[in-house]
Image (cartoon, grey):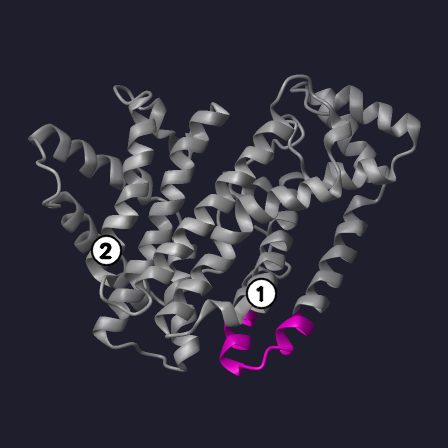
Amino acid sequence: MAAGGNGAAGGGADTRAAFAQIYKTIKEELLADPAFEFTADSHQWIDRMIDYNVLGGKCNRGLSVVDSYKLLKGADVLGEEEMFLACTLGWCIEWLQAFFLVLDDIMDDSHTRRGQPCWFRVPQVGFIAVNDGIILRNHISRILRRHFKGKPYYADLLDLFNEVEFKTASGQLLDLITTHEGEKDLTKYNITVHRRIVQYKTAYYSFYLPVACALLLSGENLENYSAVENILVEMGTYFQVQDDYLDCYGDPEFIGKIGTDIEDYKCSWLVVQALERADESQKRILFENYGKKDPACVAKVKNLYKELSLEAVFQEYENESYKKLIADIEAQPSIAVQNVLKSFLHKIYKRQK
């Protein structure tokens, strides 16, 4: 359901330390929630489950709430209360990510996540992981209620998380029925399908949600920021295209994983571009070899990508996307908003991992 890391990484060591500290507070509150009478076993289970699934990522989405809020306020340092609320919303996004990933790994029958076995693969967990995913999602509502009820933007926050969750789940559905259903059929893959999957499944929660949280904290009305939403969704799309490209052309030593999009029959930007450019005999090569585990088949697909100069196609896409994004960002009336958007863009432009 989720793209791996999002390049809009969080700020300095101080922010990271404060962010990590606030996690402990939030977890303790959830484990002492008066709405449920915990037994020793269930308390221990939830404690371990939260640590296992919420921690372990780079926390880029969560930290970028704090960074964006600072840029919107034009302040290098936040007050204690402001810092706490910004970090808390950041952690809500990390909890949302955890909820998606736990269920995603079951749907994909995955084996590892963030360098350890997927939660449902852990002995004694199995399909209890489904309920754990539901609990993680409910934790977000508990956290928001505890810390934001009474704030003028409380309803907007709830609405935002609900909206983004719906978009992401719908994107996941599209991905599942396009990629996994029945016979493998490359004719279903095209640039429009790819774009729609990416926007809904990844871009909203990874790029729009952190900035929308920061805007609400700043007292802004999200209805006035539809242009910002569009820019961030575009940025998220660009980020995923980079991911698809790096899966094939990135250095595994550097990106920390070996790409398997070809073997996994992914609706990758590269295969979509190849289908658009291939003649009949080249299409036949794709149809016969895409989605096969055999290294010889993978090599044939990669060879075809080379024939079709997809590396150059990507470089052109990257340059054009950057130019358009910069122009759209500079058309925004608020300089603070421009700064937020540029900080996201500069962290991901021409990234190698």
Label placed on residue 145: 2
Along the horizontal axis of the image, is 279 left or right of 244? Answer: right
Query: On the image, which quarter does residue 62 sit in?
Result: bottom left
- Residue at 49% x, 39% y is 169
Answer whether residue 8 is visible to the viewer in this image: yes
Q: Which is in the foreground here, disc 2 or disc 1? A: 2
Q: Tell me where the magenta segment starts and ends, as one range.
A: 326-342
Along the horizontal axis of the image, is 315 left or right of 18? Answer: right
Count every numbered label the image shows and give the total. Answer: 2
- Residue at 25% x, 35% y is 49
The secondary structure that dominates the magenta segment is helix
Q: Position of residue 349 (x, y in %)?
A: 62, 61
Tell whether position 90 is magenta. no
Q: Is residue 252 above or below residue 62?
A: above
How many residues crowd mark 1 within 10 Å: few (<14), some (14–19), many (20+)? many
Q: Secondary structure at mark 2?
A: helix
Mark 2 → mark 1, Cα distance in angstroms: 32 Å
Check disc 1 and give the amino acid type. Leu
Q: Position of residue 145 (x, y in %)?
A: 23, 55
Q: Position of residue 215 (x, y in %)?
A: 42, 70
Residue identified by numbered label 1: 345
Answer whether residue 254 is visible to the viewer in this image: no
Check disc 2 and give the amino acid type. Arg
Q: Is residue 302 above or below residue 197?
A: above
How many residues crowd mark 2 within 10 Å: few (<14), some (14–19), many (20+)? some
Q: Is residue 52 above or below residue 108?
A: below
Q: Are marks 2 and 1 in contact (CB under 8 Å)?
A: no
Tell whether position 336 is magenta. yes
- For the residue pair 305 and 34, the one nearer the viewer reads as 34
